[in-house]
């Protein structure tokens, strides 16, 4: 609750709200005391425990409280992290309808694209997907059948700027808008390129902006800025992001794994 208030104070107009789930020791998407969230947090994988029942009970209450406290002006988003089945995601989308979400992200594993038909039949909560997609063919069915509202492909994963433009043009025909992935595991170079793409794209929806650490910002001096809730690519030539190789050499590679996710009975589950 306090974190959402903190981002509103910084001028953010749309905030993805994630939280711990009562009864579960740890989960994804929660940054703690930092302004960024880095899930790859250990030299060898740590373990998260997951309960769909506890999660589905908790999330609608979280958004009820957020709307009570902050009203309906800020856009609120939520990432499911591919952890539900289609019928469970349909239930979640339905239960979140009173809180008018900007989007529900990664509701089910992205490989199961037909699953989105079932979710769509049951809820008008807007759906976002595609941060792990690599080409226009990964997006084709979801866009052509109008199963999603936002396509989350990024410059670096989905074939570069030209290919991303092709995806955006296909999406525009079906009222699907863009919402490029912008987590901190994507470098400032990717952010700079994404912002130039965003400035061009007619069916722009939103740009994810998770702040990099001060160290990362220093290694990648960049022209883009964040002010009053808006990102701007700046006036520099090209994507406007440089790399300070001397400074980068001060930070040797450190192995870091994503956690393993298990159900309470030990079954492996989707991260
Ligand atoms: Mg996500």
Image (tube, grey):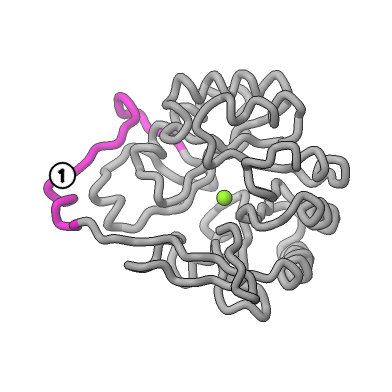
Magenta residues (range): 232-252
Q: Is residue 261 left or right of residue 116?
A: left
Q: Is residue 242 left or right of residue 112?
A: left
Image quadrant where residue 3 sits: bottom right
Question: Where is 50 relative to 100, above or below?
Answer: below
Residue occupying image coordinates x 79% and y 46%: 125
For this orientation, the residue located farthest to the left is: 246
Q: Is residue 236 magenta?
A: yes
Which one is in front, 164 or 32? 164
Which one is in front, 198 or 166? 166
Residue occupying image coordinates x 63% and y 43%: 110
Main SS, magenta residues: loop
Pinpoint residue 256: horizontal percent, then vertical percent. 34, 61
Which one is in front, 6 or 266? 266
**Mark 1 surroundings: few (<14), some (14-19) or many (≥20) residues within 10 A:** few
Pinpoint residue 231: horizontal percent, then vertical percent. 48, 40
Question: Where is 174 relative to 259, above or below?
Answer: above
The kind of secondary structure element at disc 1 is helix
**Disc 1 designates what residue?**
245
């Amino acid at each position: 609750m306090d974190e959402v208030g903190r981002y509103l104070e910084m001028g953010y107009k749309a905030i993805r709200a994630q939280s711990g789930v009562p009864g579960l020791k740890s989960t994804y998407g929660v940054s703690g005391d930092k302004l960024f969230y880095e899930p790859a947090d250990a030299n060898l994988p740590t373990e998260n425990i997951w309960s769909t029942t506890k999660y589905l009970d908790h999330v609608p209450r979280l958004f009820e409280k957020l709307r009570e406290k902050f009203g309906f002006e800020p856009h609120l988003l939520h990432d499911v992290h591919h952890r539900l089945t289609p019928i469970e995601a349909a239930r979640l989308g339905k239960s979140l309808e009173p809180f008018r979400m900007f989007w529900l992200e990664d509701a089910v594993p992205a490989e199961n694209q037909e699953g989105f038909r079932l979710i769509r039949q049951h809820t008008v909560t807007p759906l976002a997907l595609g941060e792990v997609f690599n080409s226009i063919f990964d997006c084709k069915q979801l866009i052509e059948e109008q199963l999603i509202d936002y396509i989350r492909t990024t410059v670096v994963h989905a074939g570069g700027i030209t290919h991303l433009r092709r995806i955006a043009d296909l999406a525009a025909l079906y009222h699907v808008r863009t919402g490029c992935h912008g987590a901190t595991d994507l470098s400032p170079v990717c952010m700079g390129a994404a912002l130039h793409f965003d400035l061009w794209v007619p069916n722009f929806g939103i740009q994810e902006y998770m702040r990099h650490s001060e160290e990362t910002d220093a290694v990648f001096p960049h022209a883009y800025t964040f002010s009053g809730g808006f990102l701007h690519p700046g006036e520099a030539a090209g994507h406007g992001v440089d790399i300070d190789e001397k400074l980068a050499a001060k930070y040797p590679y450190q192995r870091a794994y994503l956690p393993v996710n298990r159900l309470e009975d030990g079954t492996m589950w989707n991260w």
